[in-house]
Amino acid sequence: MIDPTRYELWFVTGSQHLYGEETLALVAENATRIVQSLNASGEIVLDIVTKPVMTSGEAISTLVREANADRRCAGLVLWMHTFSPARMWIMGLEELSKPYLHLHTQAARDLPWSTIDMDYMNAHQAAHGDREFGYLAARLRSRRKIVAGHWSDPRVVGRLGVWARSAFAVADAKGGRIARFGDNMREVAVTEGDKVEFQRRFGYEVNGYGVGELVARIADVSDADVAGLCDEYDETYRMVPELQPDGDRRDSLEVAAAIELGLRSLMENGGFVAFTDTFEDLHGLRQLPGISVQRLMADGYGFGAEGDWKTAAVVRAMKVMAYGSQHGTSFIEDYTYHLDPDGSFVLGAHMLEVCPSLAADTPRCEIHPLTIGGREDPVRLVFDAAPGPSVNASVVDMGNRFRMTVAVVDVVEPPATMPRLPVARSLWRARPDLSTAAEAWLLAGGSHHSGHSRALTVEHIEDYARIVGVELVVIDESCDLRALDRELRWNDAAYRLSSL
């Protein structure tokens, strides 16, 4: 459901004819060598393809048009091997609709002290050429990521790999379909938003579908398929006695399995990448979807509860960025606090829908009453999240723009068991501390829902926000509330002026 083979990155090297054909051949050879090394590193989620060396404005414009039209191209990596006069890049950069990374590197890592001559100097002028290109990109107010250092340096490769994942997520979102089963929760403000502008900015198509369409899919599910999925549940999870084959609530597990099969069929046949539901619109459903949502998220689908389509999109994007990681990513909510001054925590959870990719151990499959929704007791997976550094990311509509807020947290093992809490949960310490982080999140207007990931870092979200062109607010160990307040007011003024 997440397929990186659908996309690739183009490696484009800039030079000019001033130094002769021999130098241009060396430039092309070095570019090919660098790409081969990057592809062999295992750090880049997308394949990188070497493109011809660019030596004229016409060639650059032609390549840009090809990149814009090629759905496989998720972005470009640009490098000026020699001095490449930047005016020939003007039209190309103005036309470019794909994201790009400016790689400021050099073919050779070390200077050949005893043999260096002017031929070497002319052929290894990235320090010159990339500064010329950097000026033009700054002059054009061009959004890009800059990575400086030798191409063999693991730090350089790692940062390029982070950007590649963000570019992958942006490419995946183009035309990605999000299904809303029911509207957003009544009277709630933060889940509202401009779907037209969201599609223009992020790429996702957000549309509503009647719950009856899902109910009809569920009705078409065969008893044999339900039995087979229940067997899979038995083999995969720690099943409470009442849900086991001879348990007195086995029929509830069968209802949950039918919901999953119907929902999965609808999502696959409709080409959807994310979805929402709401406990206020369950007409025809016997349970609020629980284990079905959790398992679809584990397969890479985005999800938002109470009709929160923006968070569903964020979770999908984070799932794509985290592709192949052993660490989890999920929809979550900042649910409640532990406010001991000697050790404050946030307990993140939701009624049912937390992805088992976060789990520290094999989840338990349980059934419990749910006081909202007015339906039968739903089946869900219950677990504690694995500890480690994580990020929470939220997107909100500020009226004249979208704002993405990302907070760095540290998931920890609970200090005690929670035997009476029948939901999956993640317990974390906020950075720099709970009071500062909470005040900062509230100041920024971040949602109570977010994407929660142990697989990603702030840099992933930063690159993603830069590519799609939205405001980013970072809350981490260096957060200063006075500085953040000024930043938000300056941002507000800047966005208002830029819209004139």
Image (cartoon, grey):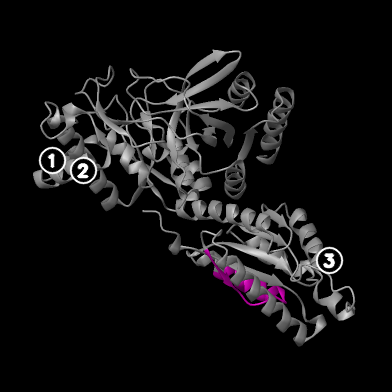
327 sits left or right of 89 in the view: left
- Do tag 2 and tag 1 residues touch (Cβ < 8 Å)? yes
Crowdedness of circle 1 by 10 Å Cα count: few (<14), some, many (20+)?
A: few
- Mark with earlier residue (1, 3): 3
Magenta stretch: includes residue 397: no
Q: Is 480 positioned to the left or the right of 449 in the image?
A: right
Mark found first going from the N terminus, 3 or 2: 3
Mark 3 to mark 2 CA distance (whole Å):
59 Å
Label 3 crowd bin: few (<14), some (14–19), many (20+), radius 10 Å: some
- Horizontal side of 349 relative to 500 (left or right) equals left
Q: Is residue 3 visible?
A: yes
Residue 100 vs 455, above or below: the answer is: below
Q: Amino acid at mark 1?
A: Ala
Q: Which residue is mark 1?
A: 219
Comparing 115 with 220, the one in front is 115
Q: Earlier in the sequence, mark 2 or mark 1?
A: 1
Residue 128, numbered label: 3
Q: CA distance from mark 1 to mark 3?
A: 67 Å
What amino acid type should be assigned to the residue bearing mark 3? His
Identity, as a three-letter code, of the amino acid under mark 2: Gly
Which segment did they paint magenta?
A: 47-66
Viewer-proximal residue, 172 or 156?
A: 156
The residue singled out by tag 2 in the image is 262
What residue occupies the far top of the structure in this picture? 340
Does residue 492 appear left or right of residue 204 in this picture?
right
Q: Does residue 54 belong to the magenta stretch?
A: yes
User: Can residue 284 be spotted in the picture?
Assistant: no
Q: Secondary structure at mark 3?
A: helix
Mark 2 residue element: helix
- From this view, report whether residue 477 is shown above or below residue 73: above
Q: Please tell me which residue is depicted at 63% across the width and 34% down the height of the picture.
A: 473
Q: Residue at x 46, y 54 (%)?
A: 172
